[in-house]
Amino acid sequence: QNIISLSHQIANFGETTLPDLESQLNGSFALSSYLSQSIFFFFIGGGDYMASCTASSGVAVECDLQSLTELLIGNYTNHLM
């Protein structure tokens, strides 16, 4: 399974995607304007749930979804702050 952590995704966006866009749009002002008019769609947590509720063999295992959900919400909140 290729699961990329939220931390890695955010770092990749900041270190790779933003500089590439800034270069293509010829500057930070154009980039800011472009991003302010953009809509971002993202789906988070699915990979985390799958990884936590699936054994290495790919077979579903019992997991505590309430605890996992609380952990994920805490992690995502930290990234947004």
Image (tube, rainbow, N blue to C red):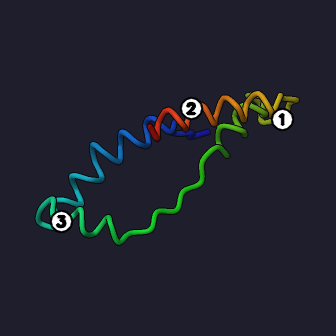
Seen as rendered, the residue at the extreme left is 26
**Quadrant location of the C terminus in the rendered image:** top left
**Viewer-closest of 46 and 74:** 74
Q: Which residue is mark 2?
A: 75
- Tell me the residue at 28%/47% (across/down): 16
Q: Is residue 50 above or below residue 57?
A: below
- Compared across the picture, whether 43 is left or right of 21 comes to right
Seen as rendered, the residue at the extreme front is 81
Q: Is residue 65 above or below residue 39?
A: above
Residue 34: where, in percent of width, then height?
28, 69
Q: CA distance from mark 3 to mark 2?
A: 32 Å
Q: CA distance from mark 3 to mark 1?
A: 44 Å
- Compared across the picture, whether 62 is left or right of 43 comes to right
- Tell me the residue at 51%/36% (across/down): 5
Q: Which residue is mark 3?
A: 24
Q: Earlier in the sequence, mark 1 or mark 2?
A: 1
Q: CA distance from mark 1 to mark 2?
A: 26 Å
Describe the element under mark 1 as helix, strand or loop.
loop
Residue 24: where, in percent of width, then height?
18, 65
* Mark 1 Cα shell of 10 Å, populated few (<14), some (14-19), many (≥20): few
Q: Nearer the viewer, mark 3 or mark 2?
A: 2
Q: Which residue is mark 1?
A: 59
Q: Earlier in the sequence, mark 3 or mark 2?
A: 3
Dots 3, 2 in contact, CB < 8 A = no
**Quadrant location of the N terminus in the rendered image:** top right
Residue 49: where, in percent of width, then height?
72, 38
